[in-house]
Image (spheres, rainbow, N blue to C red):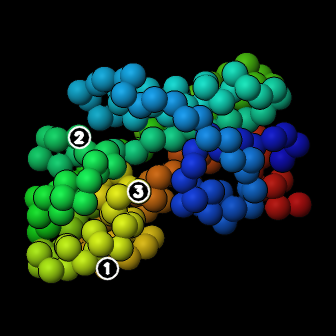
Amino acid sequence: MSFQFVLASASPARRRLLQGIGINPIVHVSNFDEDQIQQDDPARLVEALAQAKAQTVAAQRQNALILGCDSVLLVQDEICGKPASPAAAIARWQQMRGSFGMLYTGHALIDQTQDQILIRHGITKVHFANISDAAIAAYVATGEPMQCAGCFAIEGKGGLFIEKIEGCHSNVIGLSLPILHQMLIKLGYDVSKIWS
């Protein structure tokens, strides 16, 4: 692709997803203060956060395609982001085990060359195993849940505790590749050309 592709995220998992499809992004972390946005609807929340992150980075770049993303997990009508402490992570897993959550990921793609922005979100249903208190404590002690919306990384150790998903797998990792594909096509980009 004949443009700079900028990922407005510190997430190594999102960067790996892009690299896996042949896009080696420039990582430019937005450092946007997420507390500025208050929203009770998880879909609107992740879209607003993704847009804010992308626009924060766009203000510092030129002639780039900038992708912002944000994820939250909805469990029993409660919006969950990254846990605030190990104790909070343990409590959340005790709530989630044997149940399910809805993982929302917002995507905002800014095309500076065409002065366009597209905003989308994906939803994936995640079913959690009914794991023991000891397993929860051991998982939280690894530190992995502390970095993740919803308190788990399906592509990491947390994958052991996911029984089933309904919907897009990469959406759970933090970036829906089908949604990104649709957005690129809508902006007029031929994705296959990134491989030539």
Vertical side of 24 occupied by 163: above or below: below
- Asked whether the residues under the numbered discs 2 and 3 touch, taking CB atoms below 8 Å apart as contact, a structural biologist would say no
* Alpha-carbon span between mark 1 and mark 2: 23 Å
Q: Residue at x 15, y 80 (%)?
A: 134
Residue 179, x across and y down, in percent: 53, 45
Report the residue marked by disc 1. Answer: 160
> Tag 3: residue type?
Gln
Vertical side of 133 occupied by 69: above or below: above
Q: Nearer the viewer, residue 93 or 164?
A: 93
Please state if 124 lies on the left or on the right of 178 as rendered.
left
**Which one is earlier in the sequence, the residue at label 2 or at label 3?**
2
* Alpha-carbon span between mark 2 and mark 3: 16 Å
Quarter of the image where the C terminus is located:
bottom right
Tell me which corner region of the image, top left, top right, bottom left or bottom right, holds residue 167: bottom left
> Tag 1: residue type?
Leu
Q: Residue at x 81, y 26 (%)?
A: 62
Tell me which corner region of the image, top left, top right, bottom left or bottom right, holds residue 9: top right
Residue 138, x across and y down, in percent: 25, 78
Judging from the image, what secondary structure is the residue with disc 1 in?
helix
